[in-house]
Image (tube, rainbow, N blue to C red):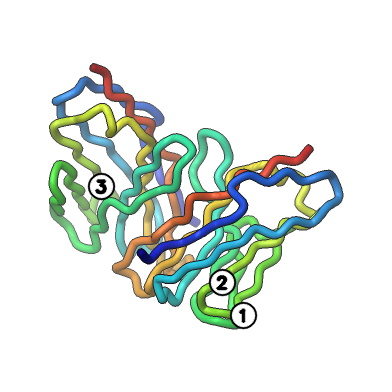
Amino acid sequence: GQSLEQPSEVTAVEGAIVQINCTYQTSGFYGLSWYQQHDGGAPTFLSYNGLDGLEETGRFSSFLSRSDSYGYLLLQELQMKDSASYFCAVRDRNYGQNFVFGPGTRLSVLP
Amino acid sequence: DGGITQSPKYLFRKEGQNVTLSCEQNLNHDAMYWYRQDPGQGLRLIYYSQIVNDFQKGDIAEGYSVSREKKESFPLTVTSAQKNPTAFYLCASSPGGPDYGYTFGSGTRLTVV
């Protein structure tokens, strides 16, 4: 099977930088994605890492180390609107190449 | 604009009833998915379909049924056999292929009364 671990909650202040970690265990790893979900809303796709290294998209960056089964999402210049839940998701060959989602990290940005 | 439309946004079901949740997409995506989300938890896969007229069970398919007669549509029926159906249901689609993320609909919140 698969398992993913993320911190349940993270708190930071506006303008700060925050890193949300994700560790995973799966025998069929293909890639790692990150999704953002505001309360009551739909998850929105943020990034995908198929290879090791850092992917940057504006204020958000995502990193993957396949040898360590580890990735993180880095959010810079935090804004109040970044308060949301963030899910890492592993694309798994042994799961029909579908995504398996982590439990989510609730980020609270304080003024 | 292209996207995924889920309806209704809120749905109330009496004990013993079947209800059907609608999911329509105009993104021309091949793959479609249904996920269930319980409060404070991640998403669990119910069913998925990679192509028209074909679908596969996910982790928690018991008590649910789907059809994929058209590329654009992937309705989910929550049957009376699903003992704990109260949850937030999310439909998603993808172009297919491993390098693409999912596009999600806005969800249907189902409550048993």
Whether marks 2 and 3 lie on the same chain: no
Mark-to-mark CA distance, 1 and 2: 7 Å
Q: Between residue B25 and residue A100, name the one nearer to us.
A: B25
Q: Quadrant of residue A39?
A: top left
According to the picture, the residue beneath numbered tag 2 turns out to be B73
**Label 1 lies in what chain?**
B
Q: How many numbered dots are placed on residues in this image?
A: 3
Q: Chain of mark 2?
A: B
- Distance (Cα) linking label 2 and label 3: 34 Å
Q: Tags 1 and 2 in contact by the CB under 8 Å rule? A: yes
Q: Position of residue A71 (x, y in %)?
A: 25, 47
The answer to the question of whether label 2 and label 3 lie on touching residues, with beta carbons closer than 8 A, is no
| Quarter that holds the C terminus of chain A | top left
B95, A34: nearer the viewer: B95
Give residue B65's position: percent from left, percent from top.
70, 65
Question: What is the chain identity of the residue bearing mark 3?
Answer: A
What label sits on residue A71 in the rendered view? 3
Residue sitting nearer the eye, A96 or A87: A87
- Residue A63 locus on image (x, y percent): 19, 49
Do the residues bearing badges 1 and 3 touch, measured as CB atoms within 8 Å?
no
Name the side, left or right, on which B37 lies relative to A82.
right
Instruction: Judge depth for marks 1 and 3 and give the one in front.
Output: 1
- Percent from the top left, x then y, of residue B10? 63, 44
Q: Is residue A25 above or below residue A75?
A: below
> What secondary structure is marked by label 2?
loop
Specify whether B40 is left or right of A51. right
At x 65% / y 62%, what residue is drawn? B76
Q: Amino acid at mark 2?
A: Ser
- Amino acid residing under circle 3: Gly
